[in-house]
Image (cartoon, rainbow, N blue to C red):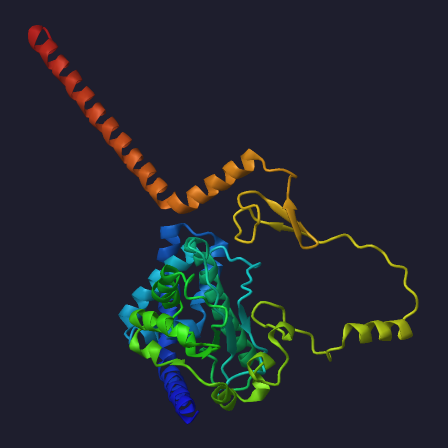
Amino acid sequence: MDVIANANREKYNLINSQYSENLEAVRELQGTLLDDILPSVTDELELDEEAIQWAEEWLADTCSLFRILRRNKFTRSFAMESIRKTLVWRLTNLWPPDPHLHLPFVQCLPSAATDPFGRPILVIKVVSFDDSSDAFKPLIIRGLECLRLHLQRLNDESRQIGTGAAPTLQYVILLDLKNLSTQSLNIDLVTWTLRDAIPKFPGLLAAAFMINYSWTHAGIWSIAKRVLPAPAISRVFFPTQQELVDYFSASVLPKDYGGTLASLTELHDPLWADPPSHQPIVSDERKEEELSLSAPPIVSVKEPSLVTAIPATSLLNPFFGYPVSSVGGSPSLHHGRRRKRDLARTLLILAWRRWRRHIIACLWAVAIIVTFRKRVWLIRTLRRGASIWTITSGSNPRL
């Protein structure tokens, strides 16, 4: 346990000292990005006001820019180029944001449950995906974005309270391997996540504790070590049950993993749900008892069900391609049937998003070619007219 604690203490002190030393450089970098880089990206992608505001919010996230600067060895020019590429990538893959996203296999423990260094704890239940890995890639990307936003909210709340504490820069992960099957593991998806997705959100992970692992998972780890860099491998731990409790303490672990907290299904998840009100938790039976004793009889009035529109291109849409209305949590087709015009509209939207730059480039090319041909035709016409006039003038002496 001392080895795990010392390794985490060393990394925690290092990243916080680097943050303090380079904070002024990050703020200067923010000014350059907002004044120079964002306007050029705006012109390149033809962004509207909402997209520009969304991009500004990301550029205002000091911790995210620090992590990118740190990944680029604190070299300003390399970091600026990396941030510009990441900004374009974000506008292509994450805009517009999906407010209905929820990943059932990712859960954040309550804010009070942290590791000894105050870092939030994520529980990820690793599951085996089928061969259609492309369907899960957008979910993984948007899930990482939710993790970034959660850290940003924690730091904003800390600044508002004025605690003066160091910002929360990273997560600690409990990786539950219980339901992971080595036979159905999608190696391509794992490799893509490690090589392509996570580098777009650098430095979010401080340490990963493997839970419920067995000797059959040794093969998976041997594969993962081939694609992970050495610093990432040093952040992976395989603790025993007692070592896990000794490091975190039982008071911050759910009883699923030997702690004294409630089970995962009963704990509030600040990552996906709204923060709970500051009121004592009362059971449903107790609530009914108190209402029946204190409140007069109330005539029940049936309230209209809440109708929520789900976009046709949302990943949560069970009828992808068609507009859906969710009434009381039950999705149904907006027009009662699958209309071909709705599907055609969705296909056009997806085609425009995917090939917009190519279409615009082709239109410009066509416009340039047409203009050039008209100019050539006009020049030839003028020359032909001049030749005819010269011949005519030469044959008629009076002219």
Q: Is residue 365 above or below residue 111?
A: above
Q: Is residue 315 left or right of residue 280?
A: left
In terms of depth relative to the viewer, which is nearer, 314 or 352? 314
Q: Is residue 99 above or below residue 250?
A: above
Q: Quadrant of residue 74?
A: bottom left
- Residue 74 in sight here: no
Residue 54 location, x and y as percent?
48, 60
Q: Quadrant of residue 7?
A: bottom left
- Residue lying furthest bottom in this view? 2
Q: Is residue 309 left or right of residue 234?
A: right
In terms of depth relative to the viewer, which is nearer, 165 or 191? 191
Q: How many marks?
A: 0
In terms of depth relative to the viewer, which is nearer, 257 or 142? 257
Residue 393 location, x and y as percent?
10, 10
**Which quarter of the rendered picture does the N terminus lie within?**
bottom left
Rendered residue at 55%/74% (across/down): 108
**Which quarter of the rendered picture does the C terminus lie within?**
top left
Residue 178 location, x and y as percent?
50, 72
